[in-house]
């Protein structure tokens, strides 16, 4: 059965795309911790991040680095935090979260409430960076 993220990859579910290549996709989290919170996923279905083979682990991190650089250029923040949790969706993914304080990456905090227009505006900022 296809995961939510696989349905995004296939185009069955829309997303606010930040970057894409033949192996990976980066898109805005629809329930962000901070403006610019982005998810980076492999296009292959793998549940647990560390089940990705070494080549994919290396390549996804290099891809995520380029996305983090775009976010940092577009969204005022001190750093881009990185989290790999993997409990929400059974598809390997990296969270890239703009940070000004360590509490900005606390996943127990309430998520931001954003509209599709808000997400589209943020995606445009980042993709133009």
Image (tube, rainbow, N blue to C red):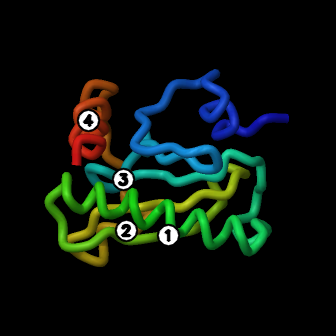
Q: What crowding class fits label 1: few (fewer than 14 Cα within 10 Å), some (14-19), or many (20 or more)?
A: some
Q: Residue at x 39, y 43 (%)?
A: 18
Secondary structure of the residue carrying tag 3 is loop
Residue 105 circle label:
2
Q: Nearer the viewer, mark 3 or mark 4?
A: 4
Q: Nearer the viewer, mark 3 or mark 2?
A: 3
Determine whether, in the image, residue 57 is placed left or right of residue 77. Answer: right
Sequence-earlier tag: 4 or 1: 1
Q: Nearer the viewer, mark 2 or mark 4?
A: 4
Secondary structure of the residue carrying tag 1 is strand
Q: Residue at x 35, y 55 (%)?
A: 33
Sequence-earlier tag: 1 or 2: 1
Q: What crowding class fits label 4: few (fewer than 14 Cα within 10 Å), some (14-19), or many (20 or more)?
A: some
- Distance Cα–Cα, label 4 vs label 1: 23 Å
Sequence-earlier tag: 3 or 4: 3
- Distance Cα–Cα, label 3 vs label 1: 11 Å
Q: Quadrant of the N terminus?
A: top right
- Distance Cα–Cα, label 3 vs label 4: 13 Å
- Measured as percent of width and height from the top left, residue 22 is found at 62, 44
- Distance Cα–Cα, label 1 vs label 2: 8 Å
The residue pinned by badge 4 equals 124
The residue pinned by badge 3 equals 37
Sequence-earlier tag: 3 or 2: 3
- Measured as percent of width and height from the top left, residue 90 is found at 72, 51
The residue pinned by badge 1 equals 83
Asked if marks 1 and 2 touch (Cβ < 8 Å), the reply is yes
Task: Relative to 60, say whether 121 is above or below.
Answer: above
């Amino acid at each position: 059965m296809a995961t939510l993220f696989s349905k995004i990859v296939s185009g069955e579910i829309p997303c606010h795309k930040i970057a894409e290549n033949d192996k990976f996709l980066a898109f805005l989290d629809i329930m962000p911790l901070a403006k610019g919170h982005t998810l980076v996923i492999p296009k292959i279905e793998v549940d647990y991040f560390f089940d990705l083979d070494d080549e994919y682990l290396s390549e996804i991190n290099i891809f995520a680095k380029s996305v983090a650089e775009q976010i940092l250029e577009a969204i005022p923040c001190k750093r881009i935090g990185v989290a790999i949790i993997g409990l929400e969706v059974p598809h390997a993914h990296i969270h890239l979260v703009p940070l000004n304080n360590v509490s900005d990456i606390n996943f127990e905090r309430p998520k931001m409430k954003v509209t599709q227009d808000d997400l589209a505006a943020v995606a445009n900022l980042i993709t133009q960076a």
